[in-house]
Amino acid sequence: MVENRRAVGCFLMVALTALLTACGGDDKKAQPLMPVSVYSVVARDEPWPVEYQAQAIGSRAVEVRARVQGIIEKRLYEEGDFVKAGQQLFQLERDQYEAMAQQAEARFDSASREWKRIVPLYEKNAVSQKDRDNARAAYESARAELRQAKINLDYCQVVSPVSGYSSKENFTVGNLVSNNSLLTYVNQTDPMHIDFAIAAPDYMRRRQLAREGRLALPPQHRYKARLRLLDGSLHAGDGDITFIDSQVQPTTGVIKARAVFSNADGGIMPGQYVRVRMEGDILKNAVLIPQKCVMLTQQGAQVMALDKDDKAFTVPVSLNVAVGDKYLVESGLVGGERIISEGLVKARPGMTVRVFETPAKAERQSPAGQK
């Protein structure tokens, strides 16, 4: 009887152990793999655009000044309006200049008659050469005085030297202005200049990559430009980078540059702040990876890669520069690898993971995050 009880107890113990083992195995099998998203590393030529804070400046900011002294009789434009080249802006009193022109014309007529009288007499040796020279000098002098008097009379009509947007008047009607008095400004806004500054280290880094053959510069260093307004919209049409300074500003450590855009519709106003996008540099056979794929550790930068069985392992990488939202890889990756982009925090070396997303959309984005 006792032996039967012992046999039954042993049987129950064995059955319970088997049951617990089976349950434990089912739990282990049921444990899901950690899902991750991966980025497929590709080595290829990539554009390297860059955006800078900039300010719009009229291509010609012209001072409109009085050329003669006189009282302002009329202002013939509305302040802030668009004016055309040659359009009259102010009318100065003409009376005294009309009188001066008439006097000059009378002196010229007299000198002209005298010159016409002396010439035939000189040919007959009836007057001396000195008389002839004096008559010729008086004639030329009177002609020059008449020309100057007519110019001064024309200066009573103050006109715009360029087409553009007018500014506020500096003198109201009735004021006496002198020669060279500043009356107003006119800003030529088509084309429009966009002034910006390039950080010297960034500029020199690009030149270094170009010397190493890893960066292709545009032909004749002629960059294209796009303009983003403060509301986020893009200005219609491309521009050109027409000027990059050959020296660094000692006080700010930047290099001055300028872009030129057509502005026939007046969409860009002088003085407004914008962002200019400089395009033209091409990274040759570049390996770019998203910044979110990189782990910065005490041992340096690393990424978590996957083998053919989706098992994770770390890869040390050497980074060069940030290109938009990506890093340019100096060494460690050559293309063809798969690296974790989402789920990186929980991934551990040796862990088998489940890939649930492909980064095709991310790969199609430009390196600077252009939309």
Image (tube, rainbow, N blue to C red):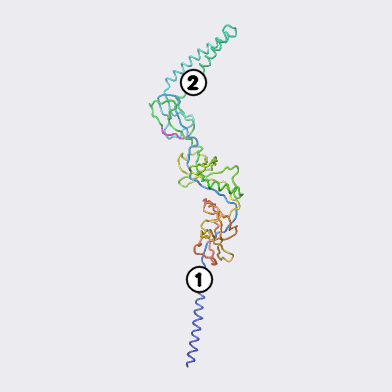
Q: Which residues are magenta?
A: 164-168
In this rendered view, identify the residue nearer to me: 186 or 247: 247
What is the total number of numbered labels drawn onto the structure image? 2
Q: Position of residue 232 (x, y in %)?
A: 47, 47
User: x, y percentage for residue 143?
Assistant: 52, 17
- At label 1, the amino acid type is Gln
Q: Nearer the viewer, residue 281 or 228?
A: 281
The question of residue 110 being in magenta is answered with: no
As drawn, 169 above or below 142? below
In the picture, residue 71 is in which quadrant?
Answer: top left
Per the image, is 166 magenta?
yes
Disc number placed over residue 31 in the picture, else none? 1
Instruction: Tell me which numbered mark, 2 or 1, is placed earlier along the sequence.
Output: 1
Mark 1 nearby-residue class (10 Å; few <14, some 14–19, many ≥20): few
Q: Is residue 323 above or below residue 73?
A: below
Q: Find residue 81 and report its horizontal and vertical position in percent.
A: 44, 34
Residue 189 in the image: above or below residue 129: below
Q: Nearer the viewer, residue 263 or 10?
A: 10
Spot occupied by residue 247 in the image (x, y as percentages of width and height): 53, 41
- Seen as rendered, the residue at the extreme left is 174
Name the residue type under label 2.
Gln
View extreme (bottom): residue: 1
Please identify the residue farthest to the top as the structure is shown. Answer: 126
Cα distance in 3D space between marks 2 and 1: 100 Å
Q: Main secondary structure of the magenta part?
A: strand
Q: Which numbered marker is on residue 88?
A: none
Q: Residues within 10 Å of mark 2 (few under 14, many from 20)?
A: some
Q: For numbered disc 2, what is the local secondary structure?
A: helix
User: Which residue is at 42% across, 19% downward?
Assistant: 96
Residue at label 2? 148
Q: Could you say whether the residue bearing mark 1 is in a helix, strand or loop?
A: loop
